[in-house]
Amino acid sequence: MEVFGNQIITFIEAGGLFAPLLFISFHLIRPLFFLPVMFICISGGILFGTIAGTVYSLIGITLSSIFFYFFVHKMPKSMNRFQKLKERIIGKQKSLTTSQIALLRLIPFIHFHLLSLCLLEISAGLKDYTKSSFFSNIPLAFIYTSIGQWITNLTPLHLSLFFLLLFPCVYMLRRKEVHIKWQEFFHIRSEERV
């Protein structure tokens, strides 16, 4: 898979004026080849530099998220599979905020479209989903594009320290709500009177 990814990057480099369009379209076909978003963002930083690479990655990732929105609405079985996966990993009653999703997208081993599903669940419609997706993609595109070469040379110790610092941030930005089912509330109240 790495050889295939390198061949595509070489093809994009040779694209000339069409290189940005090829790069953005590569973001759209990325799920078909099971390539991580991080790999493409790092490649964007190497190919186009920090600013242009971030802009192109942000456009590509946001378009990929919009395609995911339409895909799950056209394919309900896929939506059910993603929801079951989300329930196993995150929990049934938990919903994440946009800022939590933005931080979780920085972690390379968390599935990108699983987090898109979390955004889909807290969004009112396509416009709200697109806006939330755009804002949650900014840190991912900027960080992996700007320090792409640096992050590939990090030792496992440095990566572990980075993730250990990231997890408390996700916890502090959580939605602070308690959901109590109607039956549970009245069941507990009726036992207290006895």
Image: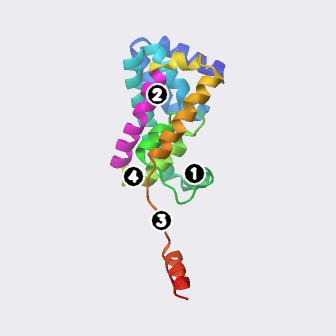
Give the mark nearest the N terminus, 2 or 4.
Answer: 2
Range covered by the magenta-colored residues: 127-145
| Depicted 33 relative to depicted 178: above or below | above
Given residues 155 and 85, the one toward you in this image is 155
Give the residue type at disc 1: Ile
Q: How many other residues sit within 10 Å of disc 4, few (<14), some (14-19) or many (≥20)? A: some
The Cα atoms of the two marked residues, 3 and 2, are separated by 41 Å
Q: Position of residue 45 (x, y in %)?
A: 46, 18
Question: Which quadrant does the N terminus fall into?
Answer: top right
Task: Decide whether residue 41 is among the magenta residues.
Answer: no
Task: Decide whether residue 143 is among the magenta residues.
Answer: yes
Which residue was labeled with disc 1? 90
- Of tags 4 and 3, which is closer to the observer? 3
Instruction: Give the colour scheme shown.
Output: rainbow
Q: How many other residues sit within 10 Å of disc 1, few (<14), some (14-19) or many (≥20)? A: some
Helix, strand or loop at label 3? It is: loop
